[in-house]
Amino acid sequence: MELGTLYAFLGVAIAVLFSGIGSALGVSIGGRLAAGVVTEDPKKFGQTLVLTALPGTQGIYGFVIGMLMVFKFAGMGGAIPVEAGFRFLVTGLPVGIVGLFSAIYQGKVAAAGIGIVAKRPEEAAKGIVYAGLVETYAILSFIISFFLYNTITL
């Protein structure tokens, strides 16, 4: 395998794997607490579901960037130049790394929001806002990865 092609594949892997791992961990953090709350009061399922699902968006951002990269180089049919491959690698870094950490921490904030729902369900929106603040950084990293993606020419 050519070095440029290897770099491109690594860029896709970083974007998709790291953000996906972060989302899986973040969703599991909220989901475990939500399951306990719903056991006590099944009517709180909808409110806890929103908070549990929020950390899953980072995985979606990484997947979108990864797929854009694959679509761009899939038509090459051969070796990707080293410089372009390195650009693919760098493109995957922001969304992958920030996605990994922001999803985990968003899961922790969402779990605290689920605690709000457990005691004061009428205040659920506050927990969503808190968790949404963490999302800001995932969105910013997605935008940077998208801008970097648009600089790649083959």
Image: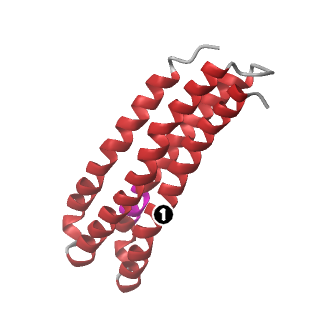
Residue drawn where x is 46% and y is 46% of the image: 97
Residue 102 rendering spot, x and y as whole percentages: 38, 52
Q: Quadrant of residue 50?
A: bottom left
Q: Quadrant of the C terminus?
A: top right
The outermost residue toward the top is 153
Amino acid identity at mark 1:
Leu
Relative height, residue 94 to residue 17 (above, below): above
Residue 83 rendering spot, x and y as whole percentages: 61, 19
Residue 109 rendering spot, x and y as whole percentages: 30, 62
Front one among 79 and 72: 79
Q: How crowded is the residue under tag 1: few (<14 C-alpha within 10 Å), some, or many (20+)?
A: many
Q: Quadrant of the N terminus?
A: top right
Q: Quadrant of residue 74?
A: top right
**53 sits left or right of 133 in the view:** right
Q: Which residue is mark 1?
A: 25
Relative height, residue 88 to residue 108 (above, below): above
Residue drawn where x is 27% and y is 69% of the image: 112
- Kind of element beneath mark 1: helix
Q: Quadrant of residue 51?
A: bottom left
**What stretch of residues is rendered in magenta?**
49-54
Residue drawn where x is 68% and y is 26% of the image: 4
Residue 59 rendering spot, x and y as whole percentages: 51, 48
Judged by its main secondary structure, the magenta piece is: helix
